[in-house]
Image (tube, grey):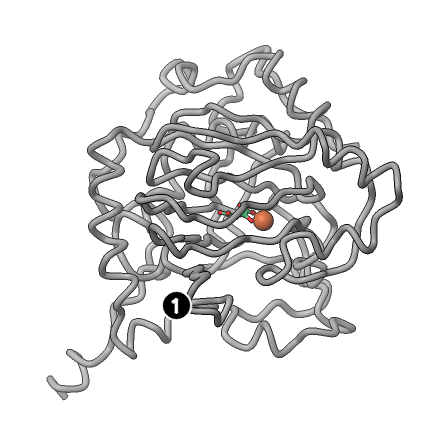
């Protein structure tokens, strides 16, 4: 029995609130104000499809997460079971390594608690315009010298097993992200292009250009390099085109991503063509609200901030 207990990994999804003291949590609406985005920032997100330069972590918090990341990149078979997806090298090419994992929040306390970081929660609430739940997290790590690309894509092309589209991505750097080490790039306004098909996450960086119009391909000339100091984040809309180039620099480029969705989002798996990609995900039955321990409510801002007037919020209609 004891042997059984020690061979089972502890599943932090059983805790629908922070398990460590890594983040101080506001206790009053007044205390939330320090994290509030301005009207201008919210407007810029709506117009461009992304918003960058939001500080989420202190340097000490980044160090703690990077220590945990070493563990997550060398997990036991039991811990691996907790992930929804885990590829030490998603590209398969040893010269273009991309570590990509979904579900780290279930395994170590820092990655569990970062989804409750107050700066993240306040900004996400304003950009989604409503109370929201965790969809899932992701880790994207490129080692120094032989880090691979993340090909241009729209996140929602991978998420059509949920509905409606009311999702938000937050990309948080665990290293300074630069054009040399493979920072993210955005295409301004591409969230207004509608939903495009999946064209691959690794391999050919530019595969998506095959399904774009001439005008859309023209806009790629104006791609925006999302250079950020570690601990800072950018947020993007589920249809915003983004991708990142290879890392041939002497520095790694590590990042944690939080994907959230408005409270009330439903499963849409009935006719989903890529069910095999979901075999380790929590069940998401057709038309059932995604809630419960795998989709914790991260911020009931409608209730917690009720006494604050003039909280700028994005309008998704
Ligand atoms: O970290 C990267 O380069 C890719 C991240 C990404 O695709 C995302 O945040 O949605
Ligand atoms: Fe993405």
Q: Position of residue 115 (x, y in %)?
A: 40, 43
Q: Is residue 89 above or below residue 210?
A: below
Q: Which residue reaches farthest right?
A: 214
Which residue is pictured at 56% across the width and 31% down the height? 225
Which residue is pictured at 73% across the width and 23% down the height? 47
Answer with the quarter of the image where residue 88 lies: bottom left
Q: Quadrant of the N terminus?
A: bottom left
Q: Position of residue 94 (x, y in %)?
A: 42, 68
Direction from residue 148 to residue 81 in the image, left or right: left
Which element type, helix, strand or loop, lies under badge 1?
loop
Report the front residue among 144 and 165. 144
Q: Quadrant of the C terminus?
A: top right
Q: Which residue reaches farthest left?
A: 2
Which residue is pictured at 52% across the width and 69% down the height? 281
Q: Is residue 234 above or below residue 286?
A: above
Binning the other alpha carbons within 10 Å of mark 1 as few (below 14), some (14 to 19) or many (20 upward) gives: some
Report the front residue among 118 and 158. 158
Report the front residue among 261 and 15. 261
Direction from residue 270 to residue 293 in the image, left or right: left
Q: Is residue 189 above or below residue 28?
A: below
Answer with the quarter of the image where residue 82 lies: bottom left
Residue at the disc numbered 1: 88
Q: Is residue 218 above or below residue 207?
A: above
- Figure label count: 1
Q: Position of residue 2 (x, y in %)?
A: 11, 84
Direction from residue 24 to residue 293 in the image, left or right: right
Report the front residue among 90 and 257. 90
Which residue is pictured at 24% across the width and 30% down the height? 59
Q: Position of residue 237 (x, y in %)?
A: 65, 38
């Amino acid at each position: 029995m004891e042997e059984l207990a020690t061979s089972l990994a502890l599943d932090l999804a059983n805790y629908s609130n922070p398990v460590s003291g890594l983040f101080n949590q506001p206790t009053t609406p007044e205390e939330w104000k320090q994290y509030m985005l301005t009207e201008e920032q919210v407007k810029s997100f709506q117009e461009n499809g992304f918003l960058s330069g939001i500080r989420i972590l202190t340097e000490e918090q980044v160090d703690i997460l990077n220590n945990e990341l070493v563990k997550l990149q060398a997990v036991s078979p039991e811990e691996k079971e907790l992930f929804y997806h885990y590829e030490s090298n998603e590209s398969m090419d040893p010269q273009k390594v991309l570590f990509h994992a979904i579900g780290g929040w279930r395994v170590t306390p820092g990655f569990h608690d970062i989804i409750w970081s107050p700066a993240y929660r306040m900004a996400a609430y304003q950009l989604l315009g409503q109370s929201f739940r965790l969809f899932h997290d992701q880790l994207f790590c490129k080692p120094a010298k032989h880090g691979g690309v993340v090909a241009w894509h729209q996140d929602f092309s991978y998420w059509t097993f949920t509905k409606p589209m009311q999702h938000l991505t937050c990309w948080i750097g665990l290293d300074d992200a630069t054009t040399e080490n493979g920072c993210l790039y955005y295409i301004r306004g591409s969230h207004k292009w509608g939903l495009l098909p999946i064209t691959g996450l690794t391999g050919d960086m530019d595969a998506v250009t095959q399904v774009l119009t001439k005008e859309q391909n023209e806009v790629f000339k104006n791609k925006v390099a999302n250079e950020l100091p570690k601990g800072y984040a950018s947020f993007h809309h589920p249809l915003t085109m983004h991708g990142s180039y290879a890392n041939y620099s002497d520095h790694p480029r590590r990042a944690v991503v939080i994907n959230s969705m408005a409270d009330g989002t439903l499963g849409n798996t009935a006719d989903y063509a890529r069910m095999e990609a979901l075999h380790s995900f929590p069940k998401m039955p057709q038309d059932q609200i995604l809630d419960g321990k795998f989709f914790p409510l991260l911020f009931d801002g409608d209730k917690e901030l009720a006494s604050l007037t003039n909280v700028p919020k994005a309008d998704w209609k």
